[in-house]
Amino acid sequence: MNQTTRAQPRIALITDDPGWHGRRLSETFAAQGYDCSVVSLTECAYRLDNDTAILDIPGFYPHLPEGVFVRGIPGGSLEQVVFYLNILHGLSQTGVKVYNDGRAIERTVDKAFTSFVLQQAGIPMPPTWVFADREQAMQVASQQLLDGHALVFKPLFSSQGEGLQLVNHVDRLSTVAEFNGVYYFQRFISAVQGDYFDWRVFVINGKAIAAAKRSGMYWLNNVAQGGVCEKASLDKALCELAEHAVALLDMDYGGVDIITDAKGCLYVLEVNSVPAWKGLQKVCEFSVADCLVNDFLSKVKHNQHVKIAVF
């Protein structure tokens, strides 16, 4: 593989909407002496000709980035999403550090598979049912509701609480519409009726670095849906549960959402491979972006030369 040097190391920040998080990361990379370029996976390409296999990353071609920090995967058809993820796989195969990589994102973007992996490993999770068949889904959901259990209906692919629906009566099942042919139901967990909260625990390089208690005016606690953060102590049980979940999914970093029931039992709700931390940062005494960038760069610093994008 041919190599050439470049005066200023360059990082690709994968996102279609840099926003607050992208600005924080770009500023932090700049402070460390790294040029950070925003890249959309929709603009990436394979160039397979003249007996070469080339990854065309906009702004870098014919070179590859020294490292790739993933802040978002675009939606699209099955073919498009597979293509986007395989760009990340291709980058990893060339030796470029991808943070989090395509494998981690695949394990967590699908809530059903995340739940399956964690449940198999003994991580406590709310009872969950996922079906492609509506009749089966409605039958199980109806029985749960008749047994007195409220349910949360979730899109299989979603973030920041978008599309979640609380179903607490059989009559409300008629309002549930499938999301792209899949029904994902999870039993609703709450410590005390009317007192809704959960925790977001942020894990980097296998270690829980910060936690926030998120409280909503109604059952949904996500900050993007109006939830409010307050600082939470890094309780041993919270840390161990979050760290174990992230390790099982083989992630560089992750945001783990944990809830408690009325008996004080903890459950993992979700594990996010591209987690937001804007709410957490408001109650955190140190820069989360600094922690992320420092860990990321520690894994790419061996790349003193920019790789030519041919493998």
Image: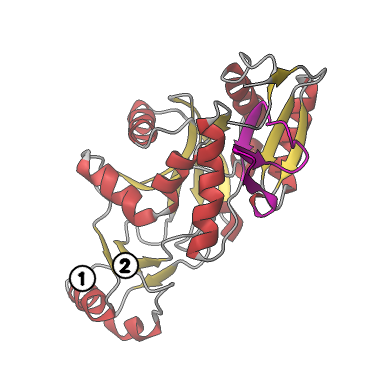
Q: Quadrant of residue 5?
A: top right
Residue drawn at (31%, 50%) of the image: 115
Decide: is 40 above or below 309: below
Q: Which residue is mark 1?
A: 144
Q: Are marks 1 and 2 in contact (CB under 8 Å)?
A: yes
Q: Position of residue 203 (x, y in %)?
A: 47, 31
Q: Position of residue 145 (x, y in %)?
A: 23, 74
In reply to whether residue 46 is colored magenta, the answer given is yes
**What amino acid is labelled 1 in the image?**
Gln
**Number of residues whose C-alpha sits closer than 10 Å to that of mark 1, classed few (under 14), some (14–19) or many (20 or more):** some
Q: Is residue 131 rendered to the left or right of residue 205?
A: left
Which of 103/294 is in front? 103
Which of 66/139 is in front? 66
Residue span colored magenta: 42-71
Query: Mark 2 or mark 1, which is nearer the start of the sequence?
Result: 1
**What amino acid is labelled 2 in the image?**
Leu
Decide: is 153 above or below 255: below
Circle 2: element type: strand
Q: Quadrant of residue 70?
A: top right
**Residue 119 seen in this snapshot:** yes
